[in-house]
Image (cartoon, helix red, strand yellow):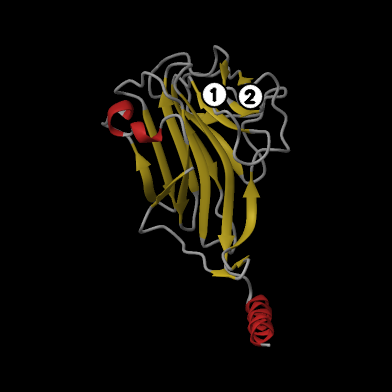
Amino acid sequence: MKTMHACAAFAATFAFGSTVLGTVIQSESFETYTTGSGYYVDLDAVTDHWLVNYDDHTVSGPGWGTYYTNTRDGTGLSDGDYFGVTSYSGAVGAFTDGEQGFQMSDVDGMATMVFDPVAGATGVSFDLFVDGTGWEGDDMIKIEVGGVVLLDTTGFDIDDDFGYLEEAWTTFNGGAGELRISLDSNSGTEAIFIDNIQWTGVPAPGVLALLGLAGLASRRRRRH
């Protein structure tokens, strides 16, 4: 798996034995949501609005949701597209955490996943898969954390300039704040997948003290 870091936003974690001090305090791998047949049907292609869950098609959950923006005056998601939480792994081979992930495709406009800031989190990481296809010049993928841009393909050709992202899971790391993942596209073959989102923070001082004592005891044992 490839890893991409945003220097200004990357929150470093520190290893102590087998314990990571950048403790995962919240995660989202889309395992607990219904998937229906894997597509979402929305009836409003003109008005910018928050998408709502439709039957078994999940596009929002606790602390996160998906916003539609009309950028193309097209059909939007009203024509029935593969969009939302899915268990279909044919495009990605396998999801990076569990059996489900979130698919964004054929928006006929722009869709933005918005994740609320997590209290106490100093960093966030997640896995992104970009399907290999004939991306067009007006297609766009944009990722922001706390207002810091980790990826923005606006004005570039995804195939030529960001081809290294295609057909592979890439791990992105960012700092604290709201996480936004956007896709602007108009074809069913133009798809991205998101999985394994983890918010990390430094444990409370009491936990750090316990880790320190454990490390001291370990060093003493090795001396004998």
Q: Which SS class for mark 2?
A: loop
Q: Position of residue 98 (x, y in %)?
A: 68, 39
Q: Position of residue 72 (x, y in %)?
A: 38, 19
Q: Quadrant of residue 90?
A: top right
Which residue is found at the position 61% from the left and 20% from the top? Answer: 39
Q: Position of residue 19 (x, y in %)?
A: 63, 67
Which residue is found at the position 67% from the left and 44% from the top? Answer: 62
Label 1 belongs to which residue?
A: 91
Which residue is found at the position 61% from the left and 21% from the top? Answer: 40
In the rendered structure, the answer to whether residue 182 lies left or right of residue 44 reads left
User: Type of residue at label 2?
Assistant: Tyr
Q: Residues within 10 Å of mark 1 (few under 14, many from 20)?
A: some
Q: Residues within 10 Å of mark 2 (few under 14, many from 20)?
A: some
Do the residues under discs 2 and 1 have CB atoms within 8 angstroms? yes
Give the camera-side residue of 190 and 99.
Answer: 99
User: Type of residue at label 1?
Assistant: Ala
Q: Position of residue 172 (x, y in %)?
A: 46, 47
Which residue is found at the position 68% from the left and 88% from the top? Answer: 224
Q: Quadrant of residue 55?
A: top right
Label 2 belongs to which residue?
A: 88
Residue 80, placed above or below residue 113 = above
In the rendered structure, the answer to whether residue 76 lies left or right of residue 195 reads left
Task: Measure how far apart labels 2 and 1 are at the Cα level.
Answer: 8 Å
Residue 106, placed above or below residue 84 = above
Q: Quadrant of residue 60?
A: top right
